Every structure is written in structure tokens, then in C-alpha cells.
Image: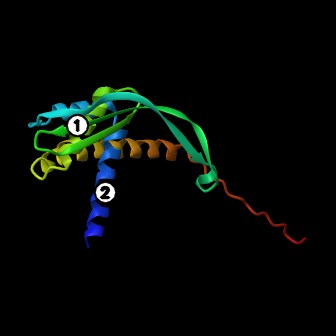
Amino acid sequence: MAVEALVEATSERRRWLSILAKAPSKDVIAAWDGLAERPAYKALRAPEVGMVLVRGRMGGTGDAFNLGEMTVTRAAVRLDSGETGIGYVAGRDRQHAEIAAAVDAMMQSANLRPAVEGAVVAHLARSQDERRDAAARKAAATKVDFFTMVRTRSPG
């Protein structure tokens, strides 16, 4: 049972870290600024910019190959209450990475999680869903249905 709980907690954390990383920086900063309570924290790893190697697979199933490099920014913080959070974001936005790390730490606190989950994570997830739906509607508007018409000759 403990293994299942650990797998579920890891899956949940992966979900909110993904939401924080994929959200536009301006949305993350606005959600952070809108929080009523922002706890004090100290940087364990100040935001730093680096590169990661991106790998790919042909068709998702072929042999892996090196696609190229990508710029990322990472940060790690610890709340005064002891929770530790990390943040990795694409690009060079140090503030985005630091806020992502702080939100990650807050999501691990039983006291802070309810407020930050609704005001930040759920809000950013809804925004991402809306953008995804808008892109899907735009793509659907350009969809062309091809069909084949069968003609038969009348005998005669």
C-alpha cells in the first residue's frame, strides 16, 4: 500500500511541475502575485541557466537519437517550514523557475496546498486547457474530409 501511495504522490507532483513548466511566464508571475499568502523561503540553488540534450525517436518507437540542445533554467528553494521545491522551465526566465520551485514546495505543505492548488495550479491548468481547446478548434476548422465516389456504369 505504501508503494501505491508513493507512486500516486509522484504522479501528482509530476503533473503540477509540468503545469508550472509549460505555463507562460506572465501567467505564472500573475498567479504568484495574486496569492494572499506567500511564505518566506531561501534559495538552495539560485536560478541558473544551462543546456540539456534533447533526445528523440522516429515514430515514438524507433532507436533514440540526439535531436539537439535546449536552454533551461532551474531553481531549488526551501520554505522556512522545511518543504523543498524544484523548478525547471524552458528558456532563460529565472523568475519563472524560482516561482515554480516555490509553488512546488508549497504544494508539499499540508497547510499551504489548498490555497496554492486552487489559485495557481488549477488556474494555470485551466488556462492551458483553454489554449489547447482553441488550437484544436482552429485545426478542426481547416479539416478536409476526402471521400471516394464510386461510379457504376449502367449496362446498356
| Occupied quadrant, residue 62 | bottom right
Element under label 2? Answer: helix
Residue 118 picture location, percent across and down = 18, 47
Which residue is disc 1 drawn over?
A: 77
Residue kind at label 2, given as amino acid type: Thr
Residue on which the image places disc 2: 10
Give the residue displayed 30% in from the left and 68% down from the top. 3
Please state if 95 lies on the left or on the right of 140 as rendered. left
Who is closer to the viewer here, 138 or 12?
12
Residue 91 image offset from top left, x and y in percent? 41, 29
- Quadrant where the C terminus sits is bottom right
Q: CA distance from mark 1 to mark 2?
A: 19 Å
Q: Does 136 sit above or below residue 49?
A: below
Query: From the viewer's perspective, is 78 left or right of 55?
Result: left
Look at label 1 and name its amino acid.
Val
Horizontally, residue 144 falls left or right of residue 17, namely right
Q: Nearer the viewer, residue 52 or 103?
A: 52
Q: Earlier in the sequence, mark 1 or mark 2?
A: 2
